[in-house]
Amino acid sequence: MKKKTTFGLLGLAAAGAGAAGGWAALGNYLYDQCMIPLVREMDEPEANEVQAKGRAWARRKIGFRDVTIRSADGLVLWAALVPGQTGCRRWAICFHGYRDTYESMGAIARWYNDQGWNVLLPDQRGHGSSEGDYVGWGYDERLDVVGWATYIARKDPGAEILLHGVSMGAAGVLMATGGPMPRQVRAAVSDCSYTSIEAEMRHLLSHWEEKPVGVPVPAGVLFSALRKTALRRAGYDLRDAAPIQAVTRSRTPTLFIHGVEDDFVPASMMGKLYQTARCPKGFLWMPGAGHATSVGTDPELYWSSVSGFLQNYFPEKKGE
């Protein structure tokens, strides 16, 4: 997710709906702006040097292999597979957020690969090289998470799998862990997930500073219009895109991470997710980090926290 894009588009949505008049026009305009995948500009700057170097590493694709699976609803999904150290059975599957591609997970994926892990970097449905024409906000993506984990489990039945997601990718991971998972999945890392897309949309609209004059559209009305249209055009209820519900069912050990300065997905959402989760869990509040920038804000703190949490679920073995 990108703040400047979402705020601006929602502003246009309300203005467009006011001009067109009518509930259907409002819902369709919002859908087109919020549910249709957007392409990230190639020259869009990174938040910090660490993540810029990570994207460059992923973009070069040296030693990467292309792999595909078919989703539960028939889409061809693509990922980059990065082999690890010979004989290593550990796999990190890294899921990116809205309006980006596998490249945005470069800094995270590279760290795991430097530790010898095999890494899988999917393009989320509708993004990059994967098929799809709408955003599932983690709801449809949760089945894709299971699909990729199943792909690895079939490829290597002795695999030890970690799921690591950022923003919408984290939401998809959390929703996936709320249901059946391959036994090879050992743990998950959720970096700056929202509690639900409804709460996230309402937050954005309530802090919207660029409301057009003469168009006082309440956040609840906008969300209701979008929800109704998404149900008709995408076939799912936005209220089901709710990690806060899934974590009550999860048994997958999960580390929750959130930037203290995140005002796009409020840091308080991580507190609610952590408190609600019934799985083995840990948390990291990242000082000074905004949305989806924790890994580059303080890499040493980020990775020491991740390593400390994972050692309980990926213990060192002789010869490693």
Image (tube, rainbow, N blue to C red):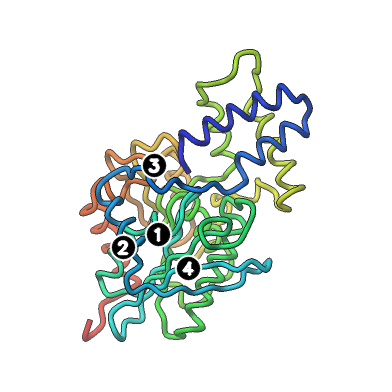
User: Which label was assigned to residue 291?
Assistant: 3
Of marks 1 and 4, the one in the foreground? 4
> What amino acid does circle 1 point to?
Val
Give the mark, 1 or 4, whose residue is nearer the N terminus: 4
> What amino acid does circle 3 point to?
His
Check the image and name the residue furthest to the top: 214
Q: Are marks 4 and 2 in contact (CB under 8 Å)?
A: no
Of marks 1 and 2, the one in the foreground? 1
User: Does 158 appear above or below 283?
Assistant: below
> What amino acid does circle 4 point to?
Ala
Left or right: 244 in relation to 295: right
User: Does 39 appear above or below 215?
Assistant: below
Q: Are marks 4 and 3 in contact (CB under 8 Å)?
A: no
Q: Are marks 1 and 2 in contact (CB under 8 Å)?
A: yes
Q: Mark 1 = which residue?
A: 189
Q: Mark 2 = which residue?
A: 309
Q: Is residue 84 visible?
A: yes
